[in-house]
Image (cartoon, helix red, strand yellow):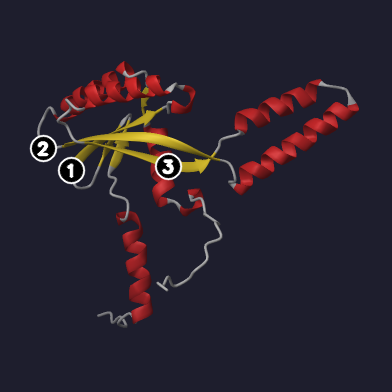
Amino acid sequence: MLFFNKPDEETRLRLKRTMTANEFVNVRDIKDEILFTKDNYLFIYLKIQPISLDLLSPREQRIKGKEFTAQFSAIRKMYKLFSISRPVDVSFMLDNLKRVQSETNHRYRREVLQHKIMETNRFALSGEILENQFYAIIWEENNKKDAERELHRSTNEIIARFKACGANVSICKKGDIIRCLNQFANPNYAHMEDDDIDEHMPFVM
């Protein structure tokens, strides 16, 4: 017969934290473009390329707003839109600068390019340059045989309405979904705001 000491409070708290770390994210599996949750729902994520309204005239902005209103006011299916701020991906720019640097034999041009590469790396690592990424989520309760087909039908309808308004939309695959979820659940992806905020107690004179 084996006897075990009763775990102390610190041990129980540590075990609880370990046990709930995986339970924090409600994901059971991801297959292709569908995320399966532990509470029996199916999710599809859409990535929406932003439209710059600053490039449009006031009249064009009003027309664009009416287009979106007309397209999406008829949808009765629930969906969510959200945006995430994250550091700009400058890997393409860095690769291009390194390629140009390797192809030139001019000493001063190489030095200028090296300085540019170092500055770009500094901006990328500091997180000073941010971009907003926009997503839409469509879901269906997985309680019937044709739930996946119904989810795809709703997704295709929403994609068609976005495209009718001139927006470029794509369905997120497994890797894109994981990267999106990491921005919520993984602290390594978090961007720390460092705005100087003065704490004070407001009062009326």
Residue drawn 11% across and 37% down? 143
Crowding near pointer 1: few (<14 within 10 Å), some, many (20+)?
A: few
Residue position marked by numbered label 2 in the rendering: 143
Label 1 with label 3: CB-CB less than 8 Å: no
Depth check, front residue: 49 or 33: 49
Crowding near pointer 3: few (<14 within 10 Å), some, many (20+)?
A: few
Label 1 with label 2: CB-CB less than 8 Å: yes
Residue 40, which numbered label?
A: 1
Q: Amino acid at mark 1?
A: Asn
N-term mark: 1 or 3:
1
N-term mark: 3 or 2:
3
Q: Amino acid at mark 2?
A: Asn
Residue drawn 32% across and 68% down? 16
Badge 3 element: strand
Q: Quadrant of the N terminus?
A: bottom left
153 with respect to 67 (left or right): left
Mark 1 or mark 3, whichever is nearer to me: 3
Q: Amino acid at mark 3?
A: Ile
**Residue 46 x/y as whole percent:** 34, 30
**Vertical comparison of 191 with 95: above or below:** below
Q: Quarter of the image holding residue 91?
A: top right
